[in-house]
Image (cartoon, rainbow, N blue to C red):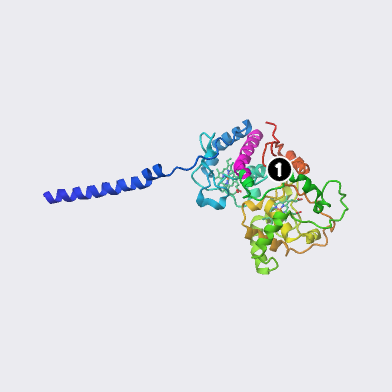
Amino acid sequence: MQHRILNYLIAAVFVALIFLTIIFVTAILPATTFQPEATRQGAYKYTASEWRGREVYKREGCVYCHTQFVRYQDREMGEMVLAGDYVNQTPHLLGTERTGPDLSNIGGKYPDAWHWAHHMQPRAVKPGSLMPSFSYLKDDEMRDLIAYLQTLGRERELEARQRGMVPQQQTSSTKGKFKQTPQHTGTEEGAGKQTPITWLEAPQELRDEWKRISKNVDTNNSAIANSGRGIYMQNCAVCHGVTGRGNGPISSSMIKKPANLTRPFYQAYTDALFYWRVKEGVAGTRMPRWGRSLSEQQMAYLVAFIKTLPVDPSTPSGDVEVTKFSQLDQPTLMDGNYNEIERLSELHSASPYNPGGGRH
Ligand code: HEC
Ligand code: HEC
């Protein structure tokens, strides 16, 4: 009898020890030893519109499907978040489940008009998406919501650019240089439409990047082009069409039509130029910045595939009215494109595409 009680006692002590050890290791130890440095504080103050947009985000339950945290182990989702990013955010909208992608770095990924279209009908820009349509939102609410989305990750990206971790976009300080480079002769204002384009080239940093990537990918290899075909059908055909003529199923509802990639004009494009256009998108149109969702390798495969599209001699052979080589942070250079966005949605929210360009 005595023995049995002793046995129970020993077992109880063991269980208690295990329990306390777990608490010590998972709770007490981290609380006392994990002392991260304080990060940037109160970094971002929302404008009234952005804050209202945040309320819409909360009310519509976006948080059930989208998270707003990028941890160390999520590095493919972009810049990691820091504690300071959440200052001013009450209640926080971290979310728990990723039915849709994390939105911490969504700001600047797409033009405002893309978001507008995506919220009206997600399947129009992302075939197969299971995100519900939010077409019942009032125009004001939609505008606010998009203004809010465009803030997500903006501070972080700007900071990363300063640290040199994200390739520097053409900014207003490099504008002079941008205007003078000969590659834009055919497309800049002032150049008549008849002026032949002597040559076109991507910015230097993109050419360097392409040089590095193309070492491992032979864009003239038909197997590689065939892999690119799959990626194209999945992501691009809906706009550019299965044959690349810019007549995909949703192109009919677009004001700025997708490029017809079979025009003889595109023979003049170098691989690096295609890569740049695919990676950075065409701001002010619905051509997304694929660099945010496809890998370098996937984009290289796409370049290989685009080059295999047959040239269609029945299409006009002259200069394509290429949307200007618009760049982030260059609202003046992209005025032409912006008129279109404004026509679509009258958006004036400040975003990386239109910094400080808000009415609010
Ligand atoms: C039922 C789940 C669900 C809800 C609710 C939802 N989404 Fe989504 N969302 C998704 C899925 C799935 C995707 C990925 C496919 C796509 O892009 O449409 C997505 C994609 C997105 C994207 C594009 C992300 C990227 O990196 O391409 C944005 C922006 C977005 N959602 C915003 C919102 C906002 C804002 C709300 C609330 C108004 C919302 N979503 C509500 C499921 C959801
Ligand atoms: C939502 C529609 C849409 C999708 C999806 C899309 N594009 Fe585009 N694309 C456009 C529009 C619009 C333009 C701009 C045409 C212009 O500038 O006149 C464009 C332009 C381009 C250009 C630049 C052409 C030029 O004149 O410089 C290339 C290259 C391109 N797209 C390739 C792709 C590839 C590759 C994909 C898939 C990964 C893709 N696009 C997906 C709409 C789309």
Q: Is residue 192 magenta?
A: no
Q: List x then y, in percent, for residue 308.
A: 72, 65
Note whether residue 358 is visible.
yes
Region of the chain picked out in magenta, as a range: 134-158
Note whether residue 136 is visible.
no
- Quadrant in which residue 347 is drawn: top right
Image check: 312 left or right of 73? right
What amino acid is found at the position of numbered circle 1 in the picture? Asp
Q: List x then y, in percent, for residue 165.
A: 62, 50
Q: List x then y, in percent, for residue 245.
A: 75, 57
- State the residue at coordinates (73%, 49%): 252
Q: List x then y, in percent, for residue 105.
A: 59, 45
Answer above or below: position of 142 versus 215: above
Q: Which residue is mark 1?
A: 329
Quarter occupied by the C terminus:
top right
Question: Which is more toward the observer, 229 or 37?
Answer: 37
Report how many numbered discs are placed on residues in the image: 1
